[in-house]
Amino acid sequence: MRPFLAICAVLLASSAGAQTVAVDGGLVRGKEWNGSTLFRGIPFAAPPLGKLRWKPPQPVRAWAGERASLDQPASCLQNDYGWNHGDFLIGNEDCLTLDVRTPSTTGRLPVLVWIHGGSNRAGGPNDIVLSDVGKQVVILGVRYRLGIFGFLSHRQLTPERGASGNYGLMDQLAALKWVRRNIARFGGDPANVTIAGESAGSQDVSLLMLAPAARGLFQRAIMESGTPGFGLPFRSLKDAEKIGDQAGQDIATLRRARAADLLKLDLKLHDDALEADDYMWLRATVDRSFLPRSPERLLAEAPARPVVIGSNRVELNIPGDHPHRDAFVAKAFGSNVAAARAYYRLDQPEPAADPRLGTRDEQIATDVTFRCPASRFASAMAAKGAPVWMYEFDAAPGGGRTAHAVEVQYAFGDARFGGLQLKPYWVNFIRTGDPNGAGLPTWTRFVGAKQRHVLFSDAGVTPQGAVRPEPCAMMDRL
């Protein structure tokens, strides 16, 4: 980076209070916003268009003059699933940008890098970047290629670099490298970085923890309702290429195709290993590059780092709903399927839904997809000597039952449970690597065979033992 640009980053400011910072590629201008400075849509890689479609992220292209980073940026291109309609409307294939919110562009503040959820096929980072956690630490939100654009493997792509797939994960890796080079200019400490995510974002955080190429780029992680595989078997590159075969065209043709046509194609792809194809891009691919070996082996090799990990008392239903329950249980528990069926009493009449626990199917899905994989990941990290704090969240607005992602408004907003907030625990962890702090009920570490966790509920913070030990002992998936 040219030295005079660093000087400009400190000196330049507009009369309206906006601030200008030098980053890879040029100058970006932010705006004063709610007690902080907000920069939106900063490019961290070249637009992944044309010949760069299904390529690893390339260096950002320099721009002349000052780039205003003030308005809502484009989300990465995605189909409309209803819940993501806002991001769908502003979707664009040219989307490799990030947002930064900072309390001060001077000093050395802790940094939070947020990786959004959405099944790796939809969503955006907008809400977290705008949360008031950004008054206490530097928050950075990443946009990464989604769905067919970010995770397609193809047998004609593999020879280009001996691997294919996981382009969205490589985008996240490029963003973390950008943080290391640039975040100090926003008042952030590149040696005090926490990566965090929810759902698919949490899965991606866990895969970054395993990826050899990401080592040294962050110090700790927060994983909300997501693990390396969501309890699914990992996808080999060979199996991933078979999904690419369904595209029915050579890669040169696909690179010339209209983006809208590729979105339609995405909806037609099928994986025989899944009970529902809305989990298509949640079945992680061992691509031989970003994930050079199986996640189990990579987890054994990964360095010990502080982790907050957990899930909600009720998350989601069985993929494909009730008609797929028996097949889902059989695939999840393998040789232990008979014991699992007995534990869940699947040969008995369907019980009425519990007001707090939901249906039996929802509890099975929560165990298989969230609780048990999280417990296994926590156990593996704790066995390395890593400080691990595990939670289960059982609170919801109005005293209702939990659901997938309900904890986010407590972790990053001002929602309360039992007279408490979750946000101080998260902020403490981002700052120091320990969620505990003055005035907070103690959150006991997850240690050894006891596998202690806490229950966050309307009753407060309650120490617990292992999470669902009976079914989790029958599963061996991450």
Image: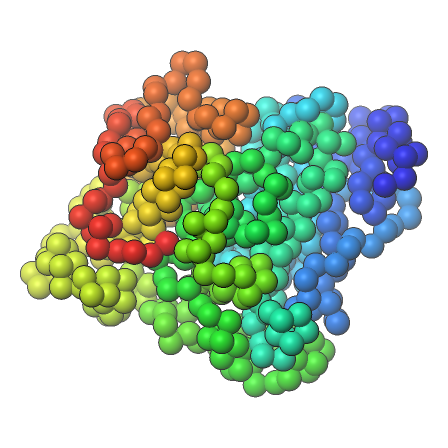
Which colouring convention does the figure follow? Answer: rainbow
Quarter of the image with the C terminus is: bottom left
x, y (%) of residue 125? 58, 46
Instruction: Point out residue 287 in the picture as x, y percentages from the top left corner.
Output: 54, 66
Is residue 384 depicted above or below 250 in this figure? above
The residue sitting at 55% across, 65% down in the picture is 288
Residue 459 position within the rendered picture, expressed as x and y whole percent measured from the top left: 25, 26
Measuring 73% from the left and 49% from the top, which residue is drawn there? 44
Q: Is residue 470 visible?
A: yes
Residue lying at the far top of the rendered structure: 438
Which residue is painted at 44% across and 18% down in the image?
437
Choose top left, top right, bottom left or bottom right for residue 1: top right
Looking at the image, which is closer to me, 91 or 200? 200
Instruction: Name the residue at the left extreme.
Output: 348
Q: Is residue 293 left or right of residue 342?
A: right
On screen, 358 above or below 448? Answer: below
**How far from the left and from the top, in percent, is residue 251?**
66, 80
In-front residue for pair 187/349: 187
Q: Is residue 435 left or right of residue 241?
A: left
Visible residue check, residue 87: no
**Which residue is rendered at x = 84% and y = 27% of the image?**
10
Left or right placement of residue 84 versus residue 42 in this view: left
Q: Nearer the viewer, residue 106 or 73?
A: 106
